[in-house]
């Protein structure tokens, strides 16, 4: 894993990490694309050439999606069951597509935010200092 390239912030004005992450933009210049696929991080920024090899959100986005979307969908399903008491197939018909749509949408947004926050806060794996 290469060292994050953070020593060049004088050349680039600070980018609001939440906004850049939600738009899927580069954490340094705020213009280049962060993703090359739906969830695949591009090798580098097309605008400022920032190397994205530092970007590793790990399981973070999935955890947030499970907790947030799970809470919303389970709460709605419980409310609907108590208030309307529909047949079981109605639950399946409503909550499975909603969970997939919300989960996939939120996964990309949260991954973008976590990577831009990782860049902003210089977060990286812990490592022992190399002897010189
Ligand atoms: Zn960039």
Image (cartoon, helix red, strand yellow):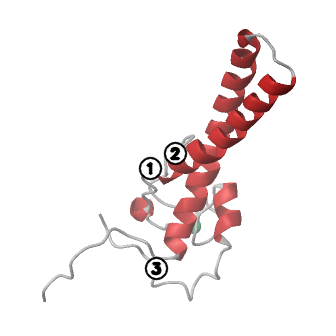
In the picture, the quarter occupied by the N terminus is bottom left
Residue closest to the eye, 36 or 65: 65
Tag 3 residue = 6
Image quadrant assignment for residue 51: bottom left
- What is the CA distance from the residue labelled 1 to the residue labelled 3? 23 Å
Q: Which residue is mark 2?
A: 62
Task: Label 2: state its secondary structure.
Answer: helix
Label 3, residues with CA under 10 Å away: few <14, some 14-19, many ≥20: few
Label 3's element?
A: loop
Secondary structure of residue under mark 1: loop
- In front of the other: 131 or 47: 131
For mark 1, does the 10 Å Cα neighbourhood hold few (<14), some (14 to 19), or many (20 or more) residues? Answer: few
- For the C terminus, the image quarter is bottom left
Which mark sits nearer the N-terminus, 2 or 3? 3
- List x then y, in percent, for residue 130: 17, 82
Q: Quadrant of ligand 1?
A: bottom right
Residues at discs 2 and 1 in contact (Cβ within 8 Å):
yes
Residue 97 spot, x, y in % from top left: 69, 24
Figure check: 90 above or below 100: above
Q: Residue at x 69, y 16 (%)?
A: 92
On whether ligand 1 comes within 8 Å of the CB at mark 2, the answer is no
- Disc number at residue 59? 1
Quadrant assignment, res 104? top right
Residue extending farthest to the left is: 131
The label nearer to you, 1 versus 3, is 1
Point 40% across, 64% down: residue: 54
Percent position (x, y) of residue 94?
75, 21
**Residue at 33% across / 68% down in the picture?**
125
In this view, the mark in front (2 or 3): 2
Res. 24 mark: none
Q: How far, Cα to Cα, is label 2 from label 1?
A: 5 Å
């Amino acid at each position: 894993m290469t060292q994050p390239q953070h020593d060049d912030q004088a050349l680039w004005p600070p980018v609001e990490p939440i906004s850049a992450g939600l738009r899927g933009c580069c954490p340094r210049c705020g213009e280049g694309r962060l993703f090359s696929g739906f969830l695949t991080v591009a090798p580098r920024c097309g605008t400022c050439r920032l190397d994205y090899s530092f970007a590793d959100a790990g399981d973070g986005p999935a955890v947030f999606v499970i907790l947030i979307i799970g809470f919303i969908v389970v709460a709605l399903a419980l409310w609907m069951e108590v208030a309307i008491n529909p047949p079981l197939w109605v639950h399946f018909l409503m909550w499975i597509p909603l969970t997939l749509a919300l989960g996939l949408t939120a996964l990309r947004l949260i991954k973008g935010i976590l990577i831009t926050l990782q860049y902003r806060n210089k977060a990286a794996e812990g490592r022992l200092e190399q002897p010189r």
